[in-house]
Amino acid sequence: MTLPMTDTAKLLAEMNDRSREVFRRVVEGYLDSGDPIGSRTLTRTMSEKVSAATIRNVMQDLEFLGLLGSPHISAGRIPTQQGLRMFVDSLLEVSEPDETDRERIDATMGSNERDMATMLDQIGSALSGITSGASLVLAPKHEAPIRHIEFVSLAPDRALVVLVFADGHVENRVFTPPVGQTPSSMREAANFLNSVAEGVTLSELRRVFDAEVVRHRQELDSLARDLVESGLAIWEDEGEPYERLIVRGRANLLDQGGEVEDLERVRELFDDLERKRDIAEFLELTDQGDGVRIFIGSENKLFSLSGSSLVVSPYMNADRKIVGAVGVIGPTRLNYGRIVPIVDYTAQLLGRLIADRG
């Protein structure tokens, strides 16, 4: 498993062996205990015999580089966000998840008779339990071919669009239709869509529609064309991302707190998790590439998870197309070496599950 490289990793090449070891041991000690690591502690673990004064000088150099920081008046050091980024990019040792973790994830697969939503919910619950963090699962879009489309008028300013898929799945969405719609324009819009949509998937419909409108522009009434456009916008955008997002294990994050500022961070995190749309849009950025990605602290641009980290991986269908994402969120003091392989294993398992179910 290869994690992406960032500019901070270049600093590592400029550091000597002693500086690298001091830095690595400070970060590993902090991730293990959550406490600042002092020079005297390091003298007992360094591979070479070196004085506490020498270690303090090295730590000061690392602090000058922006890799370590001094919390409060403590003599110890903790890694900065930049330091954590360099550590996970260059020094993090990642192996396979241990057998117990794999068995707990495998157990969520259960019977093939369960529906996908139930399966994904149980996977999210298991992942949050295993990692003691909050789990995020972005479910795949429904990609079965379309069988039938219908528009139903509910009121002058409300309409229902009904999609029936070839596998029997049905989706209903309420939306505001363009002004002036009539029963005739609704029938015309539905007839046009059914003539071009049967057998294509929802993600393919926009491309097919755009091509057919050009060919039949004179035949399709402007009211019907506006209605089709509005319907497509509803299917593509409104409600789609956050309705597909499953969040489990919020309560686990309370156990990470203690200090007042930590509890405030958790409160902000809860607020972000309630705004599922932003996080779902962020997870869809995993479409930019496969493999596990780690976002630390303020690197989370689309939501303000201050003091938090996200470990996330996309998963693919049988055609190697990214269809969703799975991740774990928690404090920056995550056990990355354990969490990364768990997220990676879960993503691969989900991919196989999606592929097996077609």
Image (cartoon, grey):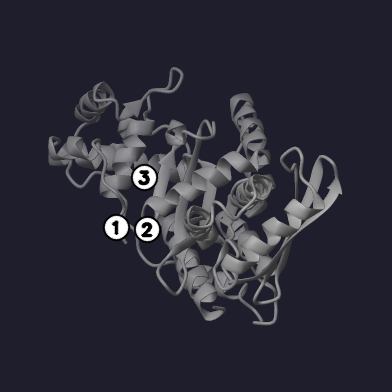
How many badges with numbers are in the image? 3
Q: Residues within 10 Å of mark 1 (few under 14, many from 20)?
A: few
Mark 2 and mark 3 lie on one chain; the one further toward the N terminus is: 3
Residue that mark 2 sits on: 291
> Which quadrant of the structure image shows residue 8?
top left
Residue 247: horizontal and vertical position, in percent?
65, 51
Tell me the distance, in whole angstroms, between the alpha carbons under discs 2 and 3.
23 Å
Q: Residue at coordinates 22% horizontally, 40% vertically from top-left?
A: 9
Q: Disc 3 designates what residue? A: 28
Point out which mark residue 2 bears: 1
Looking at the image, is mark 1 or mark 2 earlier in the sequence?
1
10 Å crowding of disc 2: few (<14), some (14-19), many (20+): some
Q: Are marks 1 and 2 in contact (CB under 8 Å)?
A: yes
In the structure shown, which secondary structural element does the residue marked by tag 3 occupy? helix
Instruction: Please tell me which of labels 1 and 3 falls first in the chain.
Output: 1
What residue do we see at 56% from left, 75% from top? 106
User: Image quarter for residue 271?
Assistant: top right
Residue density around tag 3, few if under 14, some if 14–19, many if 20 or more, within 10 Å? some
Q: Amino acid at mark 3?
A: Glu
Up-down relation of residue 153 to residue 50 (above or below):
below
User: What kind of residue is marked 1?
Assistant: Thr
Residue at 29% x, 46% y is 89
